[in-house]
Amino acid sequence: MKIDYIIVGLGLAGLSFSRELEKNGKSYIVYEDNSQNSSIVAGGMYNPVILKRFTPVWNAIEQLNLALPFYKDLEKKFNKKYDYSVDIYRIFKTIEEQNNWFIASDKPRLSNYMVSEILHEKYEGIQSNFGFGKLINTGRIDTKSLINDYRNYLLTMGLLKNESFNYEKLKLDQSNCTYEEFQATKVVFCEGFGLSTNPFFNYLPMKEAKGELLVIHAPKLKVDFLIKAAVFVMPLGNNYYKVGATFNWKDKSKNPTQEGKNELISKLESFLTVPYKIVEHVAGIRPTIKDRRPLLGKHPKHNNLAVFNGLGTRGVMIAPLAAKTLYNHLEKGVELDNDFTINRF
Ligand SMILES: Cc1cc2nc3c(=O)[nH]c(=O)nc-3n(C[C@H](O)[C@H](O)[C@H](O)COP(=O)(O)OP(=O)(O)OC[C@H]3O[C@@H](n4cnc5c(N)ncnc54)[C@H](O)[C@@H]3O)c2cc1C
């Protein structure tokens, strides 16, 4: 069967690229084998401010301008809510942090997000001796529901194969990529950390970071904003909260560990003083790159193979912009910026 594209992987990268193809009337098939789950376990937050240093995230406004309508559109398509507006309260550790916040909030790119006044309200169960800095116009995408719904949609359309893509079975010639019954003009690899086993693109320097998260039930903690301190505590509704996340650059498994759990508990209890119960513990591997930029582009030798990766710690914001950028490159010949292209390696 002749089709335009084969997509390998359906996390946030594969989903965004598939959506781009659908909007442009291209035919495709997706292979997904559940070998990675970064997009499913992700916190799903979007926030244009780096909360350690109070500096802007690279390209954040451009990313959000595309991302928010992208998720709105999917809400309409599936008649379901995925985008939850959530303010962020950053707990200050020192007076110096308060001053740095005040200075940063005045900068033009951040003033729509950072509220300049320092908040001194007290909330039951949260230790905050130096008050909070408040971020607005931020939120979370329920990536787990979105990806599940999108996969079900593709399944019913006959566009998803729940199986591993076997690289050895791919046959390439000048104009075609033949795989099983499909003859596609291009294959786009969106495998997250699965890239490490892709013989065409595993030369790219991924510096993956495993992350673990807890879901807790804390009936006495009555906040509807995200608290950011040593870890974040994100409201999910009905007194459930997501707590995360760890960063581990050595462990390459996606299994939750006792070590990760202990770290999260110890950091959580450095500022949370109400009782809670852990109800879930998950882990995934973030496909991060040393320079914290995405990886897009065609294979240096095989013109009909492309990669879409490197979404790192912020896939929710970057994926829709990166998908459009890659599509315009592959279909319209638009050059990729140095920040996006794999040619920088
Ligand atoms: C603990 C944690 C918290 C996070 N929190 C946030 C957050 O709050 N906000 C945010 O924006 N980002 C967050 N992230 C990062 C975000 O999850 C990633 O940026 C993003 O999900 C990466 O998407 P992806 O599609 O590139 O990779 P993945 O989600 O890993 O998807 C790749 C897919 O490809 C499939 N695959 C791989 N190889 C094959 C193969 N050979 N055949 C078939 N299928 C294959 C995998 O099964 C997988 O489904 C977090 C990540 C973690 C781990």
Image (spheres, helix red, strand yellow):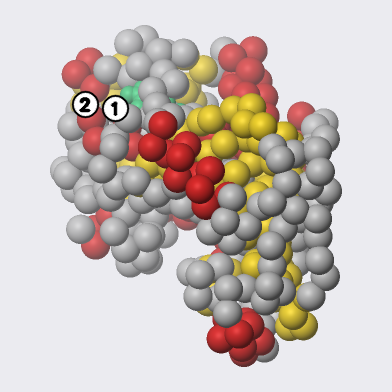
In the foreground, 119 or 272: 272
In the foreground, 56 or 298: 56
Question: What residue did someone put label 2 on?
Answer: 172
Q: Is residue 12 left or right of residue 299?
A: right
Decide: few, some or many residues near mark 1? Use Cα within 10 Å; few <14, some 14-19, many ≥20: many
Element class at badge 1: loop
Q: Residue at x 63, y 57 (%)?
A: 271
Q: Are marks 1 and 2 in contact (CB under 8 Å)?
A: yes
Residue 80: give x, y in percent of width and height: 80, 32
Q: Is residue 107 left or right of residue 329?
A: right
Asked if 148 appears above or below 323 in the picture, the reply is above
Residue 152: give x, y in percent of width and height: 63, 18
In the foreground, 288 or 320: 288
Residue 318: give x, y in percent of width and height: 52, 54
Q: Residue at x 65, y 20 (%)?
A: 153
Q: Residue at x 53, y 39 (%)?
A: 213
Q: In which quadrant is the N terminus drawn? A: top left
Q: Amino acid at mark 1?
A: Asn
Q: Is residue 87 left or right of residue 279?
A: right
Element class at badge 2: strand
Residue 328: give x, y in percent of width and height: 47, 52
Question: What residue did someone put label 1 on?
Answer: 176
Residue 235 visible to the viewer = yes
Q: Amino acid at mark 2?
A: Leu
Asked if 149 appears above or below 92 in the picture, the reply is above
Residue 76 visible to the viewer = no
